[in-house]
Image (cartoon, helix red, strand yellow):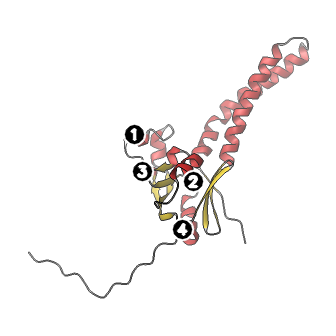
Amino acid sequence: MPKAARHPILYDVERWRKYRTWLLLPATVFALTSVFLTALKPTSGGAVGYAVVAASLFAVATSLWLRQRFTYLVREDDRLVVRSMAASRRLGSEDIDRARLIRLSAVFNRPERRRLLPRPTDRWLATEAISLRLRDGVDLRALRRVVGQRCVVDDLLVVPVADAGGLLAEVVRHVSPPPPVAPSGGRRRRARRR
């Protein structure tokens, strides 16, 4: 059986894309400066400061890269797995009331909610996301710890992911199939006359 596709959370992917150049370029310059200072003046202690700054910048860049690489949603069998680094949460059909595809502007329409979005806010409002209405028994606090405050709004899990439509199709097909429609009893409503 082929492995289900991972759907990275776009907040973390965009954060990595935004800051990678501003972290890796200065880190490389500081590292090279440290190497050259050590090679040219081995007794000088000035290279240590450059090495510490370079290591710090590389550490921040590594943490952002790891976060965007290991933060995703994936369907495993009949469960939706929400993973963020080492933490994860599994949601099954008993946890999900309804799944649909929305734009973030539908949820973040009020100013106090809009503050949760990364800047520039207008770009994010047009982004498609998967929206899962969760049932009452779901531990929303634990889910917030995994994906963050901006992804859990009221009783909704709203996550912008790469290929949101594909993930929605997987969720509807395997995890939370739509409830069966009750057949009509053959009676039709009569229009009221005034």
In the rendered structure, which disc, 2 or 3, sits on the residue that comes first in sequence? 3
Disc marking residue 161? 2
Q: Residues within 10 Å of mark 4 (few under 14, many from 20)?
A: some
Q: Are marks 3 and 1 in contact (CB under 8 Å)?
A: no
- Image quadrant where residue 175 sits: bottom right
- The residue tagged 1 is 112
Mark pair 3, 1: CA separation: 11 Å
In the rendered structure, which disc, 4 or 3, sits on the residue that comes first in sequence? 4
Q: Is residue 111 above or below residue 54?
A: below
User: What kind of element bears circle 1?
Assistant: helix
In the rendered image, the residue lying farthest to the bottom is: 186
Query: Which residue is at a point 49% across and 38% down the rendered structure image?
Result: 120
Mark pair 4, 2: CA separation: 20 Å
Q: What is the x, y in percent for residue 12?
A: 61, 44
Three-letter code, disc 1 = Glu
In the rendered structure, which disc, 4 or 2, sits on the residue that comes first in sequence? 4
In the rendered structure, which disc, 1 or 4, sits on the residue that comes first in sequence? 4
Disc marking residue 93? 4
Disc marking residue 172? none
- Mark 1 vs mark 4: give the one in front: 4
Q: Is residue 31 left or right of residue 151?
A: right
Query: Which residue is at a point 70% across and 38% down the rendered structure image?
Result: 63
State the residue in front, 46 or 175: 175
User: What kind of element bears circle 2?
Assistant: loop
Mark pair 1, 4: CA separation: 31 Å
Q: What is the x, y in percent for residue 183?
A: 38, 84
- The residue tagged 3 is 107
Three-letter code, disc 3 = Val
Q: What is the x, y in percent for residue 60?
A: 69, 33
